Amino acid sequence: MTSRPATAQASLADLQGLAERSVMDTYARAPVAFVRGEGCQLWDDEGVAYLDFLAGVAVCSVGHCHPAVVEAIQRQAKLLMHASNLCYTAPAIELAGRLAAGSLDGKVFLCNSGAEAVEAAIKLARRARPAGDIVVFHGAFHGRTYGALSATPQEAKQAPFAPLLEGIVVCDPDRPEAIAEAVGPGTAAVLIEPVQCETGIHPIEHETLLAARAACDEHGAALIFDEVQTGVGRSGALWAFQRLGVIPDALTSAKGLGGGMPIGALVAGPRLADVLRPGDHGSTFGGNPVACAAALAVLDIVDDEHFLACVRERGERLAEGLRALPGVGEQRGLGLMQAIDLHAGGAPELATRALAEQRLVVNATGPATIRLEPPLTVSNDQIDDALARLRALLG
Ligand SMILES: *Cc1c(COP(=O)(O)O)cnc(C)c1O
């Protein structure tokens, strides 16, 4: 590599200074500036290599700059970058067909992020049952926009922004009977993250998922799975619902779908596929040809039984290795979304040290919890390498 893009010339210190003056203070950023990525590796502004076990928060599903995704983006960018939803463009229509065929066999609304996919899901559910309640679980994360935030029952995230959307009913995921009590004829939807990822990879009990399905069937409510993080192979199936054996009426996708490009999707099964009518919803950038071309390239790789079997095997290897680390109290996960709780706490400090001392990118989701979500293309050697780096810190 000879020439680098101009932004890569800026040092970490330059960027920190500029960010302090110009960027709203909404993120606690680690003191690192990444300039290049390939597979499961990242390089910082000084050329130091890191092992990435976060994948841009489950976004770089097939690794950084996968050649097939790069090629699809370049090819589409030269042809047509945007034309609007006032006409037909092939990548969006083909992606919708592909997403529907590989999941719920209905219809798709394309957008640009996870929160937008959740917004579309809430609107769809309310359009099908006007003024209906949306039932959500404690510990869930559905996004930061007003509808999605209203469906995210976390005091610290919600309180400063009241009043929120009306008609959100919160129930306890650890009590399967709670869902039957919460759902009734006035329920529009039950919205579930089948594995609660942002709060530390907490899989929802099968019994609770079954109870939600039964309650929705009884009252004609929509069961919606938020698969923004669990989807696109992360669980070891293309969609987590396929591994969990409970079929929702609709699902949301984003994060890993574009392999690094911003894209989101709401997929509705046949019962809800024709609820939204012209003028009900829209997005200027939704279905963007470049983002959709990237997503099609991602699905070409991930929607493959051999690839998904590898994700399940690698997930098991990572889970076993994590359980064997010193100081680990609990390990939770499904496929390549894994978390550990540390006996002694100190997870944020551990994540900081992992980056600075071991050049390993992981994420603390709470005071005692470390989350690991490597690219789905991670190798056995890279898993063993990451475990060794963690052992060096915990040992
Ligand atoms: C990340 C996430 C969202 C929000 O996605 P954005 O693209 O950040 O808007 C919603 N739901 C789940 C389950 C997520 O993990």
Image: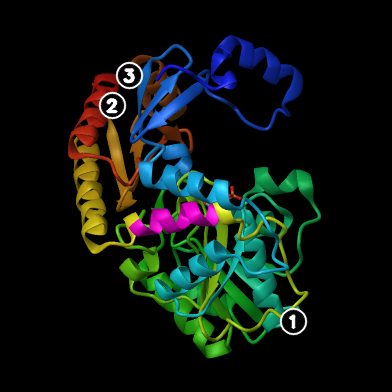
* Residue 142 percent coordinates (x, y): 58, 56
The residue type indicated by label 2 comes to: Leu
> Is disc 3 in contact with disc 2, using a CB cutoff of under 8 Å?
yes
- Residue 334 as seen in the image, left or right of residue 174: left
Q: Which residue position is annotated with label 2? A: 390
Q: Which residue position is annotated with label 3? A: 358
Is the CB of mark 2 within 8 Å of ligand 1? Answer: no
- Residue 33 as seen in the image, left or right of residue 391: right
Quarter of the rendering occupied by the C terminus: top left
The residue type indicated by label 1 comes to: Pro
Q: In this rendered view, identify the residue nearer to me: 8 or 223.
A: 8
| Residue drawn at point x = 60 percent, y = 75 percent | 189
Residue 142 shows up from this direction: no
| Position above or below: 204 against 262 | below
Provide the secondary structure element on which disc 2 rests: helix
**Mark nearer the N terminus (3 vs 2):** 3
